[in-house]
Amino acid sequence: MIPITRRMALLVTTAAVVPLLVFGLVAARTVTNSTRESVIAAHAALAAGSAESIALYLESSVRLLRAAAADLQGIGLTRDQQQRILSNHVQLPFALPADMVMPEFRELTVFDAAGTPVVSSQLGTPAPRRSALPMPPAPALTILPVEVDADSLPRTTMTLRLQEERATFLVADLRLESLWQLVGNIRVGGTGQALLVDETGRLIADGRERGGTRVARGERLGAHPLADGTGATAAQYVRADGVEVLAVSSAPIRPLQWRLIVEQPAPDAFAAARRLEIQLLVFVSLALLANIAIGVAAGRSLLRPISDLLTGIRAIGEGRLDQRVHITRDDEFKLLGEAFNATADKLGELQQAAIRQERQAMFGRIAAGLVHDLSHPIQNINNNCKLVLQMHDDPEYRASFARLVRREFGTIQRTFEDLRNLARPIPLERFPVDAGKLVLDVVERMQVQGSVAGVAVEAGTVPGETLSIEGDLFALGRVLRNLVLNAL
């Protein structure tokens, strides 16, 4: 059986704990989702800002290339003038402030339709002949994939279609050290980095460890969830090295459809959320412990009067009517305790009254028993005394009278002994009793009583064989005498 105190404490504790647990779970879930959304939004903002810088870098390269093409299309320019123009455009970025991220042209070369170099920004060694040049419709622009040169530096080639027949293509050999530096300087938290990919998932710049080697090998992010750029812009996945990371992709960077992907290990990205969850868990745990302690204390203070009343009821059930309860609370329990004490007082009074009545009834029964047990021998002696006055000269009767008196006085003495031993009754003594002699003795003793009542008391023929029964001679005789007396 579960005690009511435990049930009440459990009820109070549950009523306080369950809402707090629900609040803790909902709050933790909300904090996790909100933190994830805020982290993704922050990463997306960083990726968008960095992608804007990269777009500006590419746009500056295209503008410089178009500006060089516009200068070359002047009327009547000699080869030396064209070469000087190309050299000026190659050296232009070095004249700008160092904090500006501008494209760096290694070489600008004009090719004819057959791929033969016409004029170059480099003096001395002419540019090699190109067997196959892209043929975009004017004024389209083509950018080849990024590759690593002999100095392990990134480079790419930009080809712009010109309007002149002899100068058909303007090819720019573009250095990408600044672009790599821009991507490599992107940091998210303590360990987050960025990487730049084209529309096919091929690495262009990689700020992660050994990223330049991966770019030089021309690796593609085939298994990356954001590699194709057609799905979600954010994903959480496990890298090949077993590290779970959060990746956020920028929108395609015009005009090349490049995309910047920002990655950060999930433990680092959600460190603040985990700290907040731990703090929330600690707070909820402390609140739970406080609620449990308050619930247990309140339950005990509420149920202590019930325990006191239960103890008092048990004491009353065991007969200790002097037991009382003392409840100090000023509420219904105090009224219940006062009612219990009043009931106990009333039960005590009723018990005393019942004891007095029982004592009186007992004395009445004793008196009735004495009258019943003494009236017969005394009356029998009285009747025989009347007869002895008339038959005093009969020796046989006098002997019978003497036996009767002794027998009746023995009965009276046994009655007084039973009365004296009333508090400590003596058990009946069982001995073999001759039933025939017992019956003859009872008949002899009741003959005078019967003659007074006008009834003859006689015994039949006693069997020759002795019939013995086990019992108390005096008790059996008293029973038979009472039966005969009641019959008279």
Image (cartoon, rainbow, N blue to C red):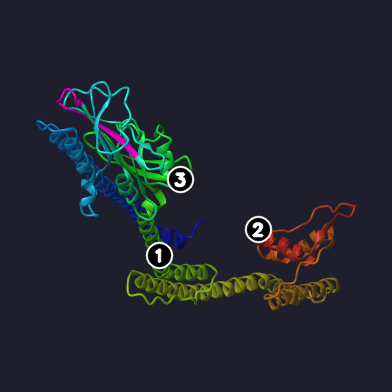
Label 2 Cα neighbours within 10 Å, binned few <14 / some 14-19 / many ≥20: few
Q: Earlier in the sequence, mark 1 or mark 2?
A: 1
Q: Position of residue 16 (x, y in %)?
A: 36, 59
- The kind of secondary structure element at disc 1 is helix
User: Closer to the camera, 350 or 147?
Assistant: 147
**Cα gap from disc 1 to disc 2, whole angstroms:** 91 Å
- The kind of secondary structure element at disc 2 is helix
**Cα gap from disc 3 to disc 2, whole angstroms:** 115 Å
Quadrant housing residue 247 = top left
Q: Which residue is mark 3?
A: 243
Judge whether 106 appears above or below 478 on screen. Answer: above
In the picture, which quadrant includes the C terminus?
A: bottom right
- Magenta region: which residues? 155-168
Label 3 Cα neighbours within 10 Å, binned few <14 / some 14-19 / many ≥20: few
Q: Residue at x 90, y 52 (%)?
A: 465
* In this picture, residue 411 sits left or right of residue 4: right
Label 1 Cα neighbours within 10 Å, binned few <14 / some 14-19 / many ≥20: few
**Magenta span includes 148:** no
The disc labelled 1 sits on which kind of residue?
Answer: Leu
Judge whether 119 appears above or below 406 on screen. Answer: above
Q: Which residue is mark 2?
A: 487
Q: Position of residue 466 (x, y in %)?
A: 89, 55
* In this picture, residue 212 sits left or right of residue 452: left
